[in-house]
Image: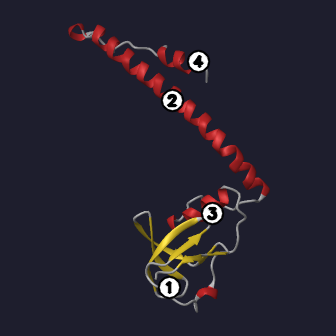
Amino acid sequence: MPNLHDNIMRLACEPDSDLHGERQAFKRGHKQARHAAAELAAAYVQLEDAMAVIAAPLQMALEMGAIKLPENGVVDLKRGLAMYQEWRGTPSADPADDRDKDREALPAGAVIDYRGEEATVVADQGGSELDVEVDGHRQRWQWTFEGVSCTVVSLPA
């Protein structure tokens, strides 16, 4: 919309009546509002252009079947990292199953890695889930997620 600013600026700006000489004040306020609306519309157009640049490779990956997104587009926070990995082009895999239920617990302080992200174990009961700390934030991780298992980097002394 190259003429969006001009179109907004051409909107009529006449008050219904000229009670108490308010016409000039009305015109001045209306002109300021039109300028603000035109600037907002221009920013929105720029935002749409920026989103199109981001959406193009994602759309191509979706069409090729390289990634799968939920049908309604809502992503569970727990799946955030996996969705990011899928968006980057990492092949998707089946979610975790019961294969980790017999996994032995790791001691607190052990360092584990999941797809390049390291975390320190805070609490682990064994099985498929454990509590970890990443950059000062406590999180609950699944040992195997999207077909990829965590690996132990180091154990506490």
The residue where tag 2 is placed is 43
Of callouts 2 and 1, which one flags the residue occurring earlier in the amino acid sequence? Answer: 2
Quadrant location, the N terminus? top right
Q: Earlier along the polypeptide chain: callout 1 or callout 3?
A: 3
**Residue 15 percent location from the top left of the image:** 34, 14
Q: Tag 4, which secondary structure?
A: loop
- Upstream in the sequence, badge 3 or badge 4? 4
Disc 3 and disc 2: Cα gap in Å?
30 Å
Q: CA distance from mark 3 to mark 4?
A: 38 Å
Image vertical order of residue 141 relative to residue 82, above or below:
below
Q: Which residue is mark 3?
A: 70
| Relative vertical location of residue 147 with respect to residue 40 in this rendering, above or below | below
Most distant residue in the bottom direction? 102
**Residue drawn at (48%, 22%) of the image:** 38
Give the amino acid type for the residue marked by disc 3 in the picture: Pro
Q: CA distance from mark 2 to mark 1?
A: 51 Å
Q: Which residue is mark 1?
A: 106
Instruction: Between residue 89 and residue 76, name the one nearer to us.
Output: 89
Q: Nearer the viewer, residue 55 or 99?
A: 99
* Dot 4 crowding, Cα within 10 Å, few <14, some 14–19, many 20+: few
**Between discs 2 and 4, the one toward the N terminus:** 4
150 or 89: nearer the eye? 150
**Which residue is disc 4 drawn over?**
3
Q: What kind of element bears circle 3?
A: loop
Q: CA distance from mark 1 to mark 4?
A: 63 Å
